C-alpha cells in the first residue's frame, strides 16, 4: 500500500515528537527570574504564532461546522456555527504555553465559555472527564474541573479576526492554564465520561495533567 504525502509527513512529525518525549528533551527546568510571574519555567517568549499539528489541515467551512456535545449528559446537543455565535460570547485575553517551549502573550479570544456549554448539556454526576475529538482525528482529554475552569473557551475569533484554518478555524478549544496541546483545533465533539481516556499525545508520553507552571510536560 502506498502512503500519501501528508501521511508521510504526519508519521515523520509523530516520530520526532515521540523522540523528544522519550529523551525528555526540552525539559530545561530553567527559570527566568525576571519574568517568573508571567513566563512558566523552561519557556521562551515568541512574537509570532507557530502552527503545530499532525500535518493535516481539515477544511471545514463555518456553514458545515457542527459541534456535538455528548456522553454522560442529560441534554446532548449539536450546535452549528450560528448557534455558537448566538450564545453568550465572551472575550478573554491570555497566554499560550506550548510544550515545545514557546509561549505567546496576550492572545485575545472570542467564543463561548466551556461553562456555558456544560450548563446547557448538564453533565450527570458520574461525569468526571472530558474528551475532545477533532476533524483531523486528534483527541485530547481533561478533567471536568479543568474544562469548566476560568478562561476555557470554545473560540471562533482570535485578535478580532475569524480564527484562521491553520490555527483550528472555524472553531477550536482554548484552555489557557494548560499546555497548548490540550487545546484541540477543529473541534467536532466534546464527550463527557466517567473514566479518563488519554488523548493522542497523552498516549504517546505527554503528561496527563499538563500544568506549565509545574512543567508537567512528559510522563
Ligand atoms: N486538532 C488538533 N488540535 C491540536 C493539535 C493537532 O494536531 N490537532 N495539536 C496540538 C498541539 S501539540 C499544539 S502545540 C497546538 C498548536 O496550536 P496552533 O497551531 O494554533 O499554535 O494545537 C493543539 N491542538
Ligand atoms: Mo504542542
Image: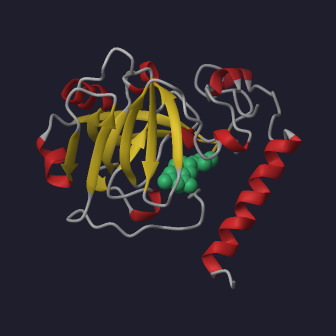
Counting from the top left corner in percent of width and height, residue 80 is at 19, 53
Residue at 61% across, 47% down = 200
Residue 150, x across and y down, in percent: 37, 22
Q: Quadrant of the N terminus?
A: bottom right
Left or right of 157? Residue 34 is right
List the single residue furthest toward the right. 23
Pick whichever, 143 or 91, lies toward us. 143
Left or right? Give the position of 23 relative to 182: right
Identified at 26% across, 59% down, the residue is 65
Foreground residue, 54 or 137?
Answer: 137
The residue lying at 85 percent from left, 38 percent from top is 24
* Relative to 59, residue 184 above or below: above
Q: Quadrant of the image for the C terminus? A: top right
Height in image: 26 above or below 170? above
Q: In this view, does 106 lie above or below 142?
A: below
Query: Residue placed farthest to the top in the image?
Result: 125
Residue 30: image location, x then y, percent: 81, 28
Q: On screen, 93 above or below 168?
A: above
Q: Which of 8 and 27 is in front in this view?
A: 8
**Image position of 33 (left or right of 5):** right
Residue 46 position in % (x across, y down): 61, 47
Viewer can see residue 50: no
Amino acid at each position: 500500500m502506498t502512503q500519501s504525502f501528508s501521511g508521510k509527513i504526519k508519521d515523520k512529525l509523530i516520530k520526532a515528537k515521540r523522540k523528544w518525549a522519550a529523551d525528555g528533551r526540552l525539559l530545561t527546568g530553567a527559570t527566568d527570574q525576571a519574568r517568573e510571574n508571567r513566563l512558566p519555567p523552561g519557556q521562551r517568549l515568541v512574537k509570532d504564532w507557530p502552527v503545530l499539528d499532525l500535518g493535516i489541515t481539515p477544511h471545514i467551512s463555518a456553514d458545515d461546522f457542527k459541534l456535538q456535545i455528548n456522553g454522560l449528559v442529560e441534554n446532548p446537543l449539536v450546535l452549528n456555527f450560528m448557534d455558537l455565535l448566538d450564545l453568550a460570547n465572551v472575550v478573554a485575553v491570555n497566554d499560550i504555553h506550548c510544550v515545545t517551549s514557546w509561549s505567546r502573550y496576550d492572545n485575545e479570544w472570542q467564543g463561548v465559555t466551556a461553562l456555558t456549554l456544560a450548563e446547557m448539556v448538564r453533565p450527570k454526576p458520574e461525569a468526571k472527564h472530558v474528551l475532545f475529538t477533532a476533524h483531523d482525528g486528534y483527541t485530547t482529554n481533561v478533567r471536568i474541573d479543568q474544562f469548566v475552569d476560568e478562561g476555557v473557551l470554545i473560540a471562533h475569533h482570535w485578535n478580532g479576526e475569524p480564527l484562521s484554518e491553520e490555527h483550528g478555524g472555524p472553531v477550536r478549544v482554548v484552555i489557557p492554564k494548560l499546555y497548548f496541546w490540550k487545546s484541540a483545533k477543529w473541534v467536532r465533539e466534546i464527550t463527557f465520561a466517567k473514566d479518563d481516556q488519554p488523548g493522542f499525545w497523552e498516549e504517546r508520553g505527554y503528561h496527563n495533567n499538563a500544568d506549565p507552571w509545574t512543567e508537567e510536560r512528559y510522563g
